[in-house]
Image (cartoon, grey):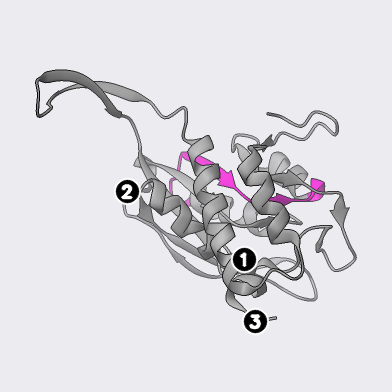
Amino acid sequence: MTDTKEKLMVHIIDHPLVQHKLTLMRMKETGTKDFRELLEEIAMLMAYEITRDLPLEDVSIETPVAPCRAKRLAGKKLGIIPILRAGLGMAEGVLRLVPAARVGHIGLYRDPKTLQPVEYYCKLPSDVGERLFIVVDPMLATGGSSVAALDLLKEKGAKSIVLLCLVSAPEGVRAVNKAHPDVPIYVAAVDERLNERAYIVPGLGDAGDRIFGTL
């Protein structure tokens, strides 16, 4: 659905399992192992939701009993682009659902003084223009990293992109909406705001640190 209260163009995946697992991830006592496993599970559930409109085509196959007409995916091939490093925690969950997808990587970090994204790595599949890319990053805070990653993908020739995040702030959603109004955003929650350190409130802390145990 689209959040219209603040005129944010964002799809909130409110499936009960997604919301339950998100609550567990928010809890400060949830350890690294459980946090990592929950994120992978949520990513798979969210990917199930965002792929429900993929086009299908009819094919003729043979079952062990008789010939039949069946459905299979048609159209663009899929690609998964985790924004390093935290995005790696979501990539495996999406891959479990669509194991044939190609995986690229975009490395960005947030300058602690300017809070602006700095690119340090980019490796994408060669057929960029032929794929639907799912860009994954657990946190959509200021939106700087997501906007930079989407800028880079489009510069490389990507034409179909979806942004998949776990938790977002209104500020980040607005930033992506403004810079890339053609890119659908899917999240499990839109939280209240950013604090003075550009952390999402109430959020769940630093996703990268909680995934990799570098608190």
Decide: is 149 above or below 77: below
Find residue 72 and report its image quarter: top left
Which element type, helix, strand or loop, lies under badge 2?
loop
The percent position of residue 26, horizontal first and vertical second, equals 74, 60
Asked if residue 209 lies in the magenta stretch, the reply is: no
Residue at 63% in and 57% down: 138
**Number of other residues with Cα within 10 Å of mark 3, as a class: few under 14, some 14 to 19, many 20 or more:** few
Asked if residue 161 lies in the magenta stretch, the reply is: yes
State whether residue 140 appears in this view: no
Q: Whole-Å distance between the Cαs marked 2 and 3?
A: 35 Å
Q: Are marks 2 and 3 in contact (CB under 8 Å)?
A: no
Q: Farthest right residue?
A: 196
Left or right for 111, reference 32: right
Q: Farthest front residue?
A: 65
Which residue occupies the foreground of this view, 38 or 200?
38
Residue wearing tag 3:
214
Which residue occupies the foreground of this view, 155 or 138?
138
The percent position of residue 161, horizontal first and vertical second, equals 51, 41
Q: Quadrant of the N terminus?
A: top right
Left or right for 76, reference 154: left
Amino acid carrying label 2: it is Asp
Which element type, helix, strand or loop, lies under badge 3?
loop
Magenta span of residues: 155-171
Q: Are marks 3 and 1 in contact (CB under 8 Å)?
A: no
Left or right for 94, reference 32: left
Which label sits on residue 127?
2
Residue at 73% in and 50% down: 168
